[in-house]
């Protein structure tokens, strides 16, 4: 074991644990320049969701014969396990470690339903596995590595409000914080209309994006949207923020529904919520919507209004539940013995 490494080693086992938050994209990532390295066509901006947490423990053992993965006490096999194993292969190659691993992950939110569960999953896995394998990496290196697992995971490594610089290749495609979590007291009120696993994975969606005639419009205007969104966040200007966030979400979904085959992530209730939010904002409420690759609607507002908004969202037919979150911190290592925090 390298000097100064504080990971536990019992019976040859190399173990570490980390937590990470999912993030909600305000300026979206949809479409890759490089599908293997997850180099996006454009930059993106997001906010970590501090009340939602994934905690992942990775244990490399010399006598394991394969990687195993359990999420919320269920053993996962097939494509999801293969994706995790491919990601661990990158870490095994970097660290020259030959062991397979046991990965145990827990989340306090529904996975695969447009709450960026893969972002939190790969950010926590990246940090825990790199530590357990003895790799000493700074946050920029971890962000680059997390991106290989799931593009948006690179944005769950730094704290608060985060921008992913698209970059030209593996070395410069990574995310940086543009403001700490306490910069702006936004609350994401997530109106859950469906908790099932989404039908089309984002990896498939990124590849299909290239079949949409609207993709060039989405990417060529991205620099403007990024600048407007960054400025609105830094100035805490809700009106401008709301306009650009909704335009960006609508643009991404326009690309999705004009791909071949088309991907419709919205459910009827999603549209009802979006139209309701538009009416509320016309009446003067600081509220706007955005949707990732799923039907659940992320309703952004300020903390003084959030209790009211949650209550009102709960009255809309089709809303099963509303989950709220404040801005969150960075991905971080956890003591192996500690509880989820
Ligand atoms: O990181 P992925 O491959 O799950 O892609 C994320 C795609 C969106 O959530 C729809 C947008 C984004 O920027 O997070």
Image (spheres, rainbow, N blue to C red):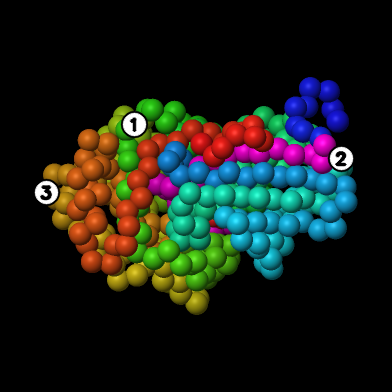
* Residue occupying image coordinates x 82% and y 41%: 13
Is residue 122 on the magenta stretch?
no
**Lower position in the chain sequence, tag 3 or tag 2:** 2
Q: Is residue 217 visible?
A: no
Is residue 32 on the magenta stretch?
yes
Residue found at the far top of this picture:
4
Q: Point out residue 119 in the picture as x, y percentages from the top left corner.
A: 55, 49
Residue assigned mark 3: 283
**Lower position in the chain sequence, tag 1 or tag 3:** 1
Q: Nearer the viewer, mark 3 or mark 2?
A: 2
**Lower position in the chain sequence, tag 2 or tag 1:** 2
Tell me if residue 325 comes above or below residue 258 in the rendering.
above
Q: Secondary structure at mark 1?
A: loop
- Find residue 50 and report its image quarter: top left
**Label of residue 184 in the image:** 1
Tell me if residue 330 comes above or below residue 46 in the rendering.
above
Q: Please name whichever residue, 29 or 272, is drawn nearer the observer in this view of the structure.
A: 272
Q: Secondary structure at mark 2?
A: loop
Q: Is residue 314 left or right of residue 324?
A: left
**Label of residue 12 in the image:** 2
* Residue occupying image coordinates x 69% and y 61%: 81
Total count of labels: 3
Q: Nearer the viewer, mark 2 or mark 1?
A: 2
Q: Secondary structure at mark 3?
A: loop
Q: Which residues are magenta?
A: 10-33
Q: Is residue 188 visible?
A: yes
């Amino acid at each position: 074991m390298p000097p100064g490494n504080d990971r536990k080693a019992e019976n040859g086992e190399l173990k570490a644990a980390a937590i990470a938050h999912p993030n909600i994209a305000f300026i979206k990532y949809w479409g890759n320049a490089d599908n293997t390295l997850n180099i996006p066509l454009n930059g993106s901006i997001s906010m970590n969701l501090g009340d939602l947490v994934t905690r992942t423990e990775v244990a490399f053992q010399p006598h394991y014969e394969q990687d195993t993965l359990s999420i919320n006490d269920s053993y996962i096999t097939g494509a999801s396990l293969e994706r995790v194993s491919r990601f661990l292969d990158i870490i095994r190659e970097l660290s020259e470690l030959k062991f397979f691993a046991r990965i145990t992950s827990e989340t306090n939110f529904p996975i695969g339903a447009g709450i960026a569960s893969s972002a939190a999953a790969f950010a926590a896995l990246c940090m825990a596995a790199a530590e357990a394998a003895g790799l000493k990496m700074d946050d920029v290196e971890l962000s680059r590595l997390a991106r290989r697992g799931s593009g948006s995971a690179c944005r769950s490594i730094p704290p608060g409000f985060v921008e992913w610089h698209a970059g030209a290749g593996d070395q410069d495609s990574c995310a940086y914080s543009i403001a700490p979590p306490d910069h702006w007291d936004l609350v994401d009120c997530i109106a859950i209309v469906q908790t099932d696993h989404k039908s089309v994975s984002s990896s498939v969606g990124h590849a299909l994006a290239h079949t949409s005639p609207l993709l060039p419009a989405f990417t060529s205007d991205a620099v403007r949207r990024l600048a407007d969104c960054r400025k609105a966040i830094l100035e805490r200007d809700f009106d401008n923020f709301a306009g650009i966030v909704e335009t960006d979400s609508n643009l991404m979904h326009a690309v999705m529904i004009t791909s071949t085959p088309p991907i419709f992530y919205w459910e009827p209730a999603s549209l009802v919520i979006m139209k309701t939010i538009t009416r509320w904002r016309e009446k003067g409420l600081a509220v706007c919507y955005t949707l990732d690759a799923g039907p659940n609607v992320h309703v952004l507002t300020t903390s003084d209004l959030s209790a009211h908004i949650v209550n009102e969202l709960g009255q809309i037919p089709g809303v099963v539940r509303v989950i709220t979150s404040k801005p969150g911190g960075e991905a971080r290592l956890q003591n192996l013995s500690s509880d989820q925090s």
